[in-house]
Image (spheres, rainbow, N blue to C red):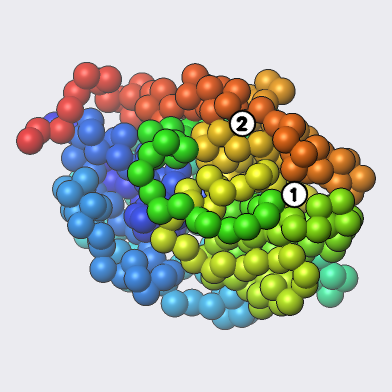
Amino acid sequence: MTDLLFLAHRVPYPPNRGDKIRSFHALRYLAARARVHLIAFADDPDDYEPHPKLRALTASCTVIPRRKGRARATLEALASGRSASLTAFDDPAMHAAVAAAPVCDGIYCFSGQMAQYLPRGARTIMDFVDVDSAKFAQLADTAALPLRPLYRREAELLGRFEREVASCVDASLFVTEAEAALFRQGGGAGRIVPVENGIDARHFDPDAAFERVDEPGHLIVFTGQMDYQPNIDAVAWFADAVLPALRLQHPQARFAIVGRQPALAVQALAKLPGVIVTGAVPDVRGWLAAASVCVAPLRLARGIQNKVLEAMAMARPVVASPSAAEGIDYRGTIAVADTAEQWIERVGAALNGAGQGADARAQVIARYDWDARLQPLDALMGLSPVERKAA
């Protein structure tokens, strides 16, 4: 029986944010084929004790609380000449846990921050997901002036580290071919493989059993982790540039921002007419099902957006920015908007009853089943597709 070491920068369960959704399904897929030894950080106190679901899936499960703040990580990075993304996740307890792990036949490393812990010798798959250094390069062009040199430094140092890692592992995974191509263009070498995100269409099903949300009027719904800067930027821009004009056409329309840990800037949006900030909800499906339209007005986005796939699976009309739609095979089932005028027009059309919700769900079912998306892992990890973990 094959033993695999699974390293993750954030404990994969519960899968309640984009990175945890991908890492959980990768873990679940591999655990059906091998004994998996999970070692992961947790930055949420609720995750410090491994969930029974994780213990049931894994042969061993070690969770390391991560308490290092952004300011400390930045100071350490400046003092050491390293990337702040790496110093943020540099922890003696994690080094000790990896050193004490069983000898494994293969390693699946999720997120570039964890590559600093990779032991030598075993077959290693590095799941970068996105080109993180490119995010910092984008931020360097758009952030407040005092922050731009820090972001440029981070983009350069992290990009150099990403390329070094890719040259040493057996394969580097990215969430779309566009991300893989971006990495190659930036000098990334080695075996570079796109492995797309998927969707659990049985869970995200408008006919499934879940608690419904009863909200009057037209609901415009955005879902996501609300202390994440691209999400903060997206909802703030939409509330300012799009929502007022929409409410002139549809006075009962309201913008629901649904997601955990809303930053202060997001909480402040609740004071605006027609804006709802929910914070964490027990089940996002209730809000998706209640939506007249789901929106993804992300101006800084990479890879496949789970929020878009989830809304499509729930058969809701979707309007997305070009960045949020990039990498998704939607074939005309969602609307794409770039300028504020386009957003007003296309969200307004959805509120008037236009949309391709049923077609979007059919496309998700046909194209984005998780097991089909993750099938390349069999060959990459040297696993037999028919091998299953012993009972």
Left/right of residue 96 with respect to residue 103 in the rendered view:
right
Q: Is residue 109 above or below residue 2?
A: below
Nearer the observer, 113 or 100: 113
Identify the residue at image location x=79%, y=62%: 239
Q: Residues within 10 Å of mark 1 (few under 14, many from 20)?
A: many
- Residue 232 appears in the picture as rendered: yes
Q: Is residue 1 above or below residue 112?
A: above
Q: In x, y percent, where is residue 145?
A: 87, 71
Q: Quadrant of residue 382?
A: top left
Secondary structure state at the residue bearing disc 2: helix
Nearer the observer, 206 or 72: 206
Point out the frontmost of discs 2 and 1.
2
Q: Quadrant of residue 224?
A: bottom right
Mark 2, residue position: 357
Sequence-wise, the earlier of marks 2 and 1 is: 1
Q: In x, y percent, where is residue 45?
A: 37, 74
Q: In x, y percent, where is residue 277?
A: 62, 68
Left/right of residue 80 with respect to residue 43 in the rendered view:
right
Which mark is on residue 297?
A: 1
Identify the residue at image location x=50%, y=56%: 213
Image quarter where the N terminus lies is top left
Single out the residue that lies furthest toward the left: 391
